[in-house]
C-alpha cells in the first residue's frame, strides 16, 4: 500500500507516524513546503519518499499522487483544502482524506460559516456582522456604541481563516476606558482591512462577533459525509504567553484525557458539541451538494448564552490537537481512512486509550507576529534526552538543509508530547526536557510552562463551573440563546431578530 | 506597603495602547495602600524613551497636575505610596530602569534606599548577563525577604519579582489577546477589565519582553511568609491575594471574634470600611442585628495610615459621623479592624456615647500590634503602640469602653486558613521571617 500525505508541520508528523504504524505496512510518501526531519525519517524508513513542493498547488499534488500511484492521499492542513487539492484528486479518481473546496468553506470563510449556521439554525450561534471595509465596520461600531450592547463587546476577526492571525477581543464594559477601547477598535479594523488585501478569494473582509467568555475546547471528528465520529475533547491554549496573556497563536499547547471528556467538561456537553458538528456537516453538504470526506472539528466554547458554542470550524485536524487524539487512538488509522473513502464509517468504532496527554509547542521569539525574526535559526535537539524523559518529539516549522543542519522556518519549532495518569504529571514530564531543544545561535525560544499545570486546570474548572451555572439556568428558564436589549428612544429590541432580518435581505 | 502596577501590551498594534489611562484607574483602585505619593513611568510610543512623573498627591490630583504635559506611552509602571517623596526608583546606568516596589528588600537603609540598592544591582546584573531572567533570579536570591517589585528597562523589559517567602503580594491578569497587567491586588485588575490569571509565586521572577513572557521559580522550601496584615487590613475586600479571597477571610474573622470573647448587645456596628465584613458575620453568628452606625464625609481616608496625629483625628472626625437613630439607648458591639495608637478608637467610642449609646463593647478584628514591620509597612514607633503597652482591660478603661478585646493570633491564623509557617505575623508577635529560612 502507498499513501501520500500533504503538509509539513507537527500535525503532519503525527499523522505520518500513525499511518506508518498501520498493519498494512504502507509506504509513506509526503509533499511539504519544509523538509520536516520527522516526516523525512518516516518516509525513508517505510521506503517512501519526501517531495518538497507546494502543498496548495492542486496540479502538483495531483500529478505527484498519480505518478506515485498511491492508494489514497491524506491532507493535513487547511490551505490545500481551500485551494482545491482534494477536488483535483477527486477529478483524478484518487481517494482523499480531506475536505473539498466547497465543504471546506465552513473553515475558510468565518463569515459564511456563521451565515450557514444561522440559516440551518444549528445551536451554539453567535451574533455577527460582516463588512467589506474598515470604514463600513467602524461606522457601525461607532453608531451603535451608545446602544446595542453586543456591538460594544466584540471579537474583531479577519472574515477568512488566516492562520489564527488578527483576532482581537475588545470588551468595552468600563465606561471610563471607553475612549481608549474605541480608539483601539478603529485602529484594528484598519489593520484588518490591510491584512485582508492579501486574500482575494473572499468578499467579506472584516467579521465582528459578539464577545463571549468561557472555557474553550476542540472536538475533532472523522466523517464520510454520512457519519460523524467524535474523538476525545482537547483544549488548545491560544494565548502566546504564560498566564493566558498575549497574542493569538495557532496554539501553544493542548491537553486531553484521561477520558473522552476534559476534566472540567461534562459528557452531556460532549454530546451536545458532537450534535452541533454533525449538524454543521449536514448543513454544508445540503448547501453545496458536495460530500464531506475527511476531518471536521468544532473549535468551541462553553458560553453563558448558548452553552456549547461554535467559535470556529476546522476542515482538518487541529495543530497541536491532532497530536493528542492520534496518540491515544487505538484503531489502525489506515482502516479509518479506508472506511471514510468507502463511506462505511457507520460500521467503525473508534477506540481511545485512557491516558492524560499534554502537548507543548516551543517557538522561536518572534512567533507569531514577527515570523521573520523567528526564521533561519539553526536548531539543536537532544532527541535521546526527550525519549529518556518519556516524551515524544514532533518536528514542526523547520527544515532539514542539504548540509544536514535543521533550520527554523518561522512558526512553532517543535511540539513535545507526554502521556501520564494525570495532566499535571504529563506537563511536568515535558518541563523536564524542554531545555533539550535550543537554537544553536543563541536566539531565544519560548513555551508555556503553565499548560496542563494544576494551577491552570483549577482556573479552567472554576471558569467552566461559573459558565455552566449560567447556561443551565437559561436552559431551565427557556431563555437559552435569547438576547434582549434596550435602545433608549427606540424601545426593546431583539438582536437575534434583527440579525435574521438582515440575513433575509 | 505601596500599591504597584505594570502594564504591558503584546502583538500587532501594541503601540496603539495608552498605558497611562489603565494606570490611572488601576492605581486609583490601589489607593487604599497609600496615597501620599503617586508615581508613574511610561515608555513613549515613538522615542521609546522612559519618562518618569512623581508628585506628592493622590492619583486624581496627580493626573490633574500632569495634564498638559505629554503623558502617553504604551508600556508603563506605577506606584502609590503612603509616604511623601516615595516614588519610583530610577537608575541611569549601566542599564536605565525604573522600579516600583512594595515592602522592603533586606538591604541597608530605609525603604527607598534599600530599593535603590536593589535597582542598582539589577541594573548592573542586566548589563552583565545575557538573559534578564538570570539577572532577575540573581536579584531575588541576593535581596533577602520582604519585597515585590516591577521594574521597567530601557530595553522594553518588564521584570516582576516576589521575594522567596512571598511576604508581599503580586498578581497577574490579562486583557483579550493584547495586554498583560501585574498588580499588588487583583481588584485593580478587575477595575481595568482584566481577567485575573493568578499570583506570581513566592521566589518567582517573570520577565515580559516584546516577544515573550518567561518565568522562573527558585527552588525553595515550603516556608512562606504571606503578610497576615494584608488579609486583616491592607488589601481590598474584593481582592484575592495568593488565591485567597480577602472577603472570605474577613467574614471568618467576624465569626471567630464572636466565638472568642462572649458579650451581649442590642446591635452590632462596624467601623467603615474595613471592619464592615467582620461586623456582618459577627452579627450573623451571634444573631444580634447589624446596623449602619456611621456616615462618612469626604474622600475615603485610611485613618491608621495617616502620618500626623492632627490629620488622623481630623480624618476620623470627618470620616465617621455616628448615626444617632441607630445607636441611641442601645448596647453596642463595636467592631474595628485594628488598633494602633488607640486615639481614633477613643474618639469613636466617645462619639457613640454622646449620641446615646448605653454600653460600648469593642471587638477588634486583628491581634494587638506590638512590633514594627521590617518590610516597610508604616507602623508608628513601638512606644506609641497601645497594644504593646497595655492590657485589654486597661485599653477598655482608656478608650472608655465597657469591654475591649482583640482577635487572638490563633484566631487570625484560623480565619486566614493557612498554617502558621506560611504567614508573617511579625507585627503581632515580634518574630519575623528571615532569609535564613529561604532554603
Image: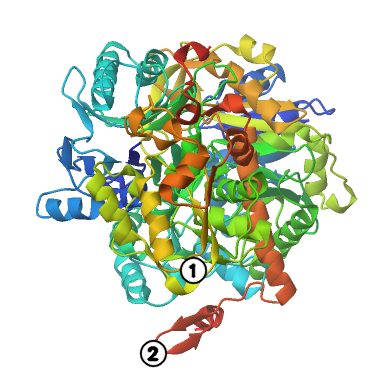
Left or right: A88, with B355 as reference point: right
Instruction: Say which chain tag 1 marks.
Output: B
Q: CA distance from mark 2 to mark 1?
A: 47 Å
Residue for point 63% across, 53% down = B263
Which of B18/A107 is in front?
B18
Q: Which mark is residue B313?
A: none
Q: Residues within 10 Å of mark 1 (few under 14, many from 20)?
A: many
Q: Residues within 10 Å of mark 2 (few under 14, many from 20)?
A: few
Q: Could you tell me which secondary element the residue under label 1 belongs to?
A: helix
Residue for point 70% across, 32% down = A423
Residue A337 horizontal/vertical position (percent): 77, 42
Q: Could you tell me which secondary element the residue under label 2 belongs to?
A: loop
Question: Is residue B423 in view from this perspective?
Answer: yes
Which of A223/B387 is in front?
B387
Quadrant (top left/top right/bottom left/bottom right) for the N terminus of chain B:
top left
Residue for point 42% across, 90% down = A490
The image quadrant that residue B323 belongs to is: bottom left
Question: Is residue A65 in view from this perspective?
Answer: no
Left or right: B154, with A468 as reference point: left
Looking at the rendered structure, whether the residues under marks 2 and 1 are on a common chain is answered as no
Judged from this view, the residue extending furthest toward the bottom is: A490
Q: Which residue is mark 1?
A: B327
Left or right: B388, with A64 as reference point: left
Residue B373 horizontal/vertical position (percent): 39, 28
Residue B117 horizontal/vertical position (percent): 25, 18
Instruction: Say which chain tag 2 marks.
Output: A
The image quadrant that residue A39 belongs to is: top right
Judged from this view, the residue extending furthest toward the right is: A347
Q: Which residue is mark 2?
A: A489
Amino acid at each position: 500500500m502507498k499513501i501520500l500525505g500533504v503538509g509539513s508541520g507537527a500535525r503532519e508528523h503525527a499523522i505520518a507516524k500513525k499511518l506508518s504504524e498501520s498493519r498494512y505496512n504502507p509506504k509513506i510518501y509526503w509533499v511539504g513546503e519544509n523538509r520536516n526531519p520527522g516526516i523525512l525519517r518516516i518516509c525513508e524508513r517505510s521506503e517512501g519518499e519526501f517531495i518538497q513542493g507546494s502543498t496548495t498547488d492542486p496540479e502538483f499534488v495531483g500529478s505527484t499522487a498519480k505518478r506515485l500511484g498511491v492508494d489514497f492521499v491524506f491532507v493535513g492542513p487547511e490551505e490545500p483544502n481551500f485551494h482545491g487539492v482534494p477536488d483535483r484528486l477527486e477529478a483524478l479518481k484518487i481517494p482523499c482524506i480531506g475536505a473539498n473546496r466547497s465543504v471546506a468553506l465552513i473553515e475558510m470563510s468565518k463569515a459564511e460559516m456563521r451565515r450557514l449556521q444561522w440559516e440551518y439554525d444549528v445551536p451554539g450561534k453567535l451574533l455577527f456582522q460582516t463588512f467589506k471595509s474598515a470604514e463600513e465596520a467602524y461606522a457601525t461600531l461607532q453608531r451603535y456604541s451608545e446602544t446595542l450592547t453586543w456591538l460594544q463587546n466584540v471579537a474583531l476577526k479577519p472574515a477568512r481563516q488566516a492562520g489564527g492571525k488578527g483576532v482581537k477581543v475588545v470588551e468595552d464594559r468600563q465606561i471610563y476606558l471607553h475612549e481608549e477601547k474605541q480608539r483601539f477598535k478603529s485602529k484594528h479594523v484598519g489593520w484588518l482591512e490591510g491584512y485582508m488585501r492579501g486574500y482575494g478569494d473572499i468578499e467579506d473582509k472584516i467579521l465582528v462577533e459578539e464577545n463571549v467568555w468561557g472555557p474553550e475546547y476542540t472536538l475533532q471528528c472523522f466523517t464520510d459525509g454520512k457519519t460523524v465520529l467524535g474523538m476525545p475533547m482537547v483544549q488548545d491554549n491560544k494565548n502566546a504567553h504564560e498566564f493566558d496573556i498575549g497574542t493569538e497563536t495557532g496554539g501553544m499547547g493542548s491537553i486531553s484525557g484521561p477520558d473522552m471528556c476534559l476534566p472540567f467538561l461534562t459528557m452531556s456537553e460532549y454530546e451536545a458539541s458532537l450534535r452541533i458538528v454533525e449538524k454543521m456537516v449536514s448543513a454544508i453538504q445540503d448547501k453545496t451538494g458536495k460530500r464531506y470526506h475527511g476531518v471536521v472539528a468544532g473549535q468551541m466554547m462553553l458560553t453563558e448564552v448558548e452553552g456549547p458554542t461554535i467559535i470556529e470550524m476546522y476542515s482538518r485536524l487541529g495543530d497541536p490537537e491532532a497530536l493528542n487524539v492520534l496518540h491515544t487512538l487505538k484503531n489502525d488509522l489506515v482502516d479509518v481512512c479506508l472506511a471514510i473513502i468507502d463511506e462505511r464509517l457507520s460500521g467503525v468504532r473508534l477506540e481511545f486509550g485512557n491516558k492524560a496527554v499534554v502537548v507543548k509547542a516551543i517557538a522561536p521569539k518572534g512567533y507569531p507576529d514577527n515570523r521573520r525574526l523567528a526564521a533561519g535559526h539553526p536548531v539543536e535537539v537532544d532527541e535521546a534526552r526527550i525519549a529518556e524523559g518519556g516524551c515524544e518529539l514532533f518536528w514542526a516549522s523547520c527544515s532539514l538543509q542539504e548540509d544536514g543542519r535543521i533550520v527554523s522556518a518561522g512558526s512553532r519549532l517543535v511540539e513535545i508530547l507526554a502521556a501520564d495518569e494525570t495532566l499535571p504529571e504529563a506537563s511536568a514530564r515535558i518541563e523536564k526536557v524542554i531545555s533539550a531543544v535550543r537554537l544553536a545561535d543563541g536566539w531565544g525560544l519560548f513555551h508555556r510552562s503553565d499548560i496542563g499545570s494544576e494551577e491552570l486546570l483549577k482556573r479552567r474548572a472554576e471558569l467552566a463551573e461559573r459558565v455552566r451555572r449560567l447556561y443551565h439556568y437559561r436552559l431551565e428558564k427557556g431563555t437559552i440563546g435569547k438576547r434582549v436589549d434596550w435602545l433608549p428612544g427606540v424601545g426593546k429590541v431583539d438582536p437575534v431578530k434583527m440579525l435574521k432580518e438582515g440575513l433575509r435581505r | 506597603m505601596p500599591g504597584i502596577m505594570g502594564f504591558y501590551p503584546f502583538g500587532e498594534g501594541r503601540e496603539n495602547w495608552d498605558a497611562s489611562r489603565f494606570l490611572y484607574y488601576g492605581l486609583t483602585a490601589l489607593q487604599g495602600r497609600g496615597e501620599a505619593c503617586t508615581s508613574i513611568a511610561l515608555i513613549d510610543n515613538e522615542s521609546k524613551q522612559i519618562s518618569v512623573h512623581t508628585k506628592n498627591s493622590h492619583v486624581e490630583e496627580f493626573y490633574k497636575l500632569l495634564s498638559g504635559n505629554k503623558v502617553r506611552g504604551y508600556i508603563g509602571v506605577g506606584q502609590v505610596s503612603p509616604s511623601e517623596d516615595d516614588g519610583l526608583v530610577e537608575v541611569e546606568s549601566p542599564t536605565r530602569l525604573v522600579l516600583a516596589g512594595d515592602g522592603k528588600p533586606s538591604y541597608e537603609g530605609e525603604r527607598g534606599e534599600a530599593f535603590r540598592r536593589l535597582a542598582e544591582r539589577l541594573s548592573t546584573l542586566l548589563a552583565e548577563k545575557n538573559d534578564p531572567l538570570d539577572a532577575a533570579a540573581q536579584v531575588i536570591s541576593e535581596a533577602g525577604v520582604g519585597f515585590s517589585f516591577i521594574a521597567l528597562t530601557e530595553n522594553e523589559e518588564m521584570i516582576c519579582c516576589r521575594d522567596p517567602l512571598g511576604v508581599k503580594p503580586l498578581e497577574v491578569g490579562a486583557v483579550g489577546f493584547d495586554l498583560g497587567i501585574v498588580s499588588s491586588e487583583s481588584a485593580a485588575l478587575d477595575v481595568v477589565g482584566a481577567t485575573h490569571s493568578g499570583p506570581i509565586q513566592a521566589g518567582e521572577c517573570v520577565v515580559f519582553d516584546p516577544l515573550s513572557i518567561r518565568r522562573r521559580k527558585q527552588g525553595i522550601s515550603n516556608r512562606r511568609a504571606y503578610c497576615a496584615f494584608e488579609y486583616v487590613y491592607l488589601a481590598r475586600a474584593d481582592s484575592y491575594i495568593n488565591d485567597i479571597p480577602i472577603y472570605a477571610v474577613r467574614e471568618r474573622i467576624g465569626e471567630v471574634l464572636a466565638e472568642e470573647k462572649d458579650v451581649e448587645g442590642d446591635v452590632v456596628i462596624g467601623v467603615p470600611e474595613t471592619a464592615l465584613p467582620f461586623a456582618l458575620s459577627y452579627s450573623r453568628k451571634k444573631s444580634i442585628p447589624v446596623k449602619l452606625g456611621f456616615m462618612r464625609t469626604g474622600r475615603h481616608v485610611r485613618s491608621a495610615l495617616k502620618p500626623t496625629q492632627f490629620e488622623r483625628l481630623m480624618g476620623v472626625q470627618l470620616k465617621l459621623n455616628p448615626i444617632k437613630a441607630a445607636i441611641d439607648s442601645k448596647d453596642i458591639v463595636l467592631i474595628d479592624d485594628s488598633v494602633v495608637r488607640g486615639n481614633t478608637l477613643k474618639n469613636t467610642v466617645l462619639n457613640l456615647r454622646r449620641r446615646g449609646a448605653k454600653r460600648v463593647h469593642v471587638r477588634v478584628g486583628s491581634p494587638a500590634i506590638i512590633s514594627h514591620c521590617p518590610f516597610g509597612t508604616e507602623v508608628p514607633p513601638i512606644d506609641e503602640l497601645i497594644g504593646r503597652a497595655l492590657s485589654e482591660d486597661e485599653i477598655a478603661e482608656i478608650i472608655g469602653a465597657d469591654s475591649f478585646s482583640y482577635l487572638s493570633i490563633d484566631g487570625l491564623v484560623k480565619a486566614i486558613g493557612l498554617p502558621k509557617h506560611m504567614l508573617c505575623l511579625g507585627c503581632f508577635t515580634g518574630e519575623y521571617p528571615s532569609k535564613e529560612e529561604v532554603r
